[in-house]
Image: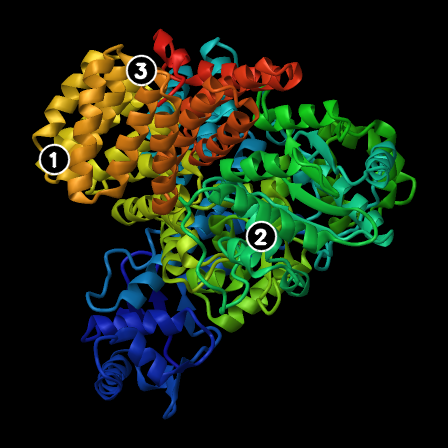
Amino acid sequence: MPRLTISLLGPPRIERDGAAVEVDTRKAVALLAYVALSERPHGRDALAGFLWPDYDAEHARAALRRTLSALRKGIGEEWIEGGRERIVLRREAGVLWIDVDEFHAQLREAAGHGHPATEVCEACLTPLTAAVALFGSDFLSGFALRDSADFDDWQFLQADELRAELGSALERLVRLHCARGELDTALPHARRWLALDPLHEPAHRRLIELYAWSGRRAAALRQYRDCVRLLDRELGVSPLAETTALWEVINDTRTPERPQELAGASALTQRPAQVARAGRPTPVAYPLVGRETELATVLGAWRGSDARGHLAVLEGEAGIGKTRLAEDFLAAARAEGATVLGARCYEGEAGLAYSPFADALAEPGGGEPLAQLPETVLVEVARLSPLRRDLPPAPPLDSPGARTRFFEALSRAILALTGGERPGILFLDDLHWADAASLDLLTYLARRPRPLFTLVTWRSEQVPVGHVLRRLAADARRAGRGSALALERLSLEAVAELAASAPGLADGSAGELAGVLHAETEGLPFFVTEYLDAMSAGGPAERSLPSGVRDLLRARVADVGEVAAQLLTTAAVMGRPFDFETAHTASGRSEEEAVSGLEELTARGLVRELAGPDGAPPSFDFSHEKLRAQVYEDTSLVRRRLLHGRVADAYAAGTGGRRPRETASSLVAEHYRLAGREADAAEHFARAGHHARGLYANAEALAHFQSALALGHPAVAALHEALGDLQTLGGDYGAALASYEKAAAQADPRTAAAVEHKLAGVHDRRGEWERAESHYEAALGGLASDGERARLLADRSLTAHHGGRDGRARELAHEALGLADAAGDARALAQAHNMLGVLASSERDLKGARTHLERSIALGEQLGDATVHAAALNNLSLALRAGGETEAAIDVAEQALELCARQGDRHREAALHNNLADLHHEIGRSEAAMAHLKEAVTIFADIGEEGVALPEVWKLVEW
């Protein structure tokens, strides 16, 4: 039988008995490459649709027949086995040679010497050298089909996978030549490794080290500068700390320390060439050690909690064992009859409002307890977790008291899901990644007595002094309803106890290893168990400690199958947790392949299955964040961008993910941004901003709108105006003015007039009356309706009153009332009546003031306008105070405070706290007065901008 040679690493080349073969069409080459890399048969229909996607079925099959005929004519009839439905390339040992198969065979040979695939021994030199020599250039270099996007995607993925394998081989060759002292031989391999991905920092570091060890200090420093420039230009980031530390050593004319593996004969190079490989590792259930006191403390706090509730905090560094301790506590509490509701916060969801609470409410088994709640409560809860299709729509989010109703409904739902004879438990893990809106809700829960034990964990280094979480925990402790534990690293004795529990290490060697293990891991539990897993899996020959945590994590995933590795990479790009449907879609693998890959990953303990809500499929999560981060880091930038785009497309289409499409816009946007699809990212960031704003999540909305602008969203004026609105509410007046000015500069005349009106409002808040007047004047000519002019005149009246010109203020208020009445504009009427009430109150006409202000309140309630409603309530409170009705004034002011807090209007919230402090002081409630005064001072101090004195900000009383 003639010999057939197929070369795909580089431009495609086909040879039959050493002579080049030319085929008539590019499709024939594409077909041969596709079937050559797969040992399984392919259906004719699938191949026809794959290569001719624009044809109908009949014409596609006809084109396939013609292409098969041309291919057989070129390479020989005997090589293509094809029945009526299936096609496969015939594989005869010794007569078919494919360079990609040979490349993989050499890599398998290098991985079969009894050590992890990421390590090297002397026997690896020959196969690794042969493997990299086969790789002339990229897979099918210079070849493409113009009319098959599916083939292009397949070619791209194959090329990317092969480049990643080449990079791993080159890295190992560099290490091996260094171990042999052959630095000059290692250098070209290191340069080639870096050329595969110029943004890969480990390759930069190794090249810098090689130059330094070779005595080429100038080249080492130049390589560092190249690394800094590339990272800044392409990613906008600085090098990692270890890269900078390496540069500092070389810059100080010192030589970097050479690890043991590079000093000559290491343990790796001394191993026998062939050692039987261990079977597939299985996750080890290690006991909880060194945490007995902490576990007893948390259990005691739960058992001692009462109807007022309790907030318990577990904090410490990453990998210290917070989650493990919490899980053991929850298991013990469940055994004693507790009902637990739990959720985890994720780094990638910090911009997704109420994310952990949405997850908690969607836990399995929640349908029955929630069904007992009133429909009004279920309607509010359905904003985060859809419960029933027959629920009526929720009331407008800007209606009076909406935020309180929303939070209270969520509180009742949580209590319903945790109810029982023993205190229920709400567990929130990794709270340092929680979004701002979730922290607001947690604050609401923790500060109101209720029979709920709330356990939270956070990383100490990510929750600085003064953070809202630390203030909340301190308040709970002062009230006798809180406790906190800071976890320390394990002692030598605890590490020895863990080592004794590891399979295969329970003999005398466990004690010997404990000291080395404790020194290597510094007692961090996550690293201890990872090292024990690595050593246990390898058997006695593998008991030497790996050279570092990164190598250890890489070793855990090094020998997973091809499909499982691809699925793991996709999951690392998706973030934590991930759903099967999206992982399967984005990975490009078939459903059956994806299921098999996921089963392998769960069997190895790399990912774990999480139960889904009632009737919903499960989701999956990595065993630890550091593992996900390492897999992501080791993925090439090109592949990351491809996968981020696929994940975003799946989420945007609503075909995957844990959340309804409309609530996941920020995740979609971030994936599009990382995929380099900036227009798509900008659009979804804008959607996310509007959604977050509707859920009172102003901080998230602000960040999303800023991202949309930075990525080139076309609605520049509208987004700057939205930013100005949010910055005004937050009291960041300098930023608000800048945003409004940008909006006015790019808006049409009518919109520009509305923005001028808002600019005037900001200057009024800052006490800059003349500047406010100039903006009112600029806006007046551009407003199209009497209603809009009436609203402006009412606001202008307020500015005149603040500036001490009450006569002018009265004229403007009456003019505003007349225009509003003629136009039938309810909002303008409410504002005009509010101003007339303020002016009447200042003249001690308290009866007239109440009439106008109560009319304004009624209109504000009717409109559902929290801004108008809160202003009238505040001013009515002042009028009641002037009339001696202090208790009534307090009640009305508290209603106004709730409305302002819900909107996030920080300046007016501070003013209301100040007014309430005065009211409580007048009737001798010193403690309440001081509490409100402290809140007022704290908020007032945050308003304005740093370094700019705005004394009028502190004087706000009425508006």
Residue, x 36% and y 40% (percent of image)?
860
Location of residue 291 in the rendering, given as x and y in whole percent from the top left corner: 83, 34
Residue topped by disc 1: 783
What secondary structure is found at the residue carrying circle 2? helix
- Name the residue rendered at 56%, 58% in the picture: 378
Q: Residue furthest bottom?
A: 84
Label 3 environment density (alpha carbons within 10 Å; few <14, some 14–19, many ≥20) = many
Residue corresponding to mark 3: 766
User: For the residue labelled by badge 1, is the local secondary structure a helix, a strand or a loop?
Assistant: loop
N-terminal of the two: label 2 or label 1? 2
Q: CA separation, marks 2 and 3?
A: 42 Å
Task: Look at the picture and state if 407 lies above or below 660.
Answer: above
Closer to us: 747 or 275? 747
| Residue 927, x across and y down, in percent | 66, 16
Q: Is residue 194 left or right of residue 496?
A: left
Q: Position of residue 322 (x, y in %)?
A: 72, 37
Is residue 362 visible to us here? yes
The residue shown at (47%, 49%) is 573
As helix, strand or loop, the secondary structure at mark 3 comes to helix
**Amino acid beneath label 3:** Arg
The answer to whether 754 is drawn above or below residue 680 in the figure is above
Distance from Cα at disc 3 to Cα at disc 1: 24 Å
The image quadrant that residue 49 belongs to is: bottom left
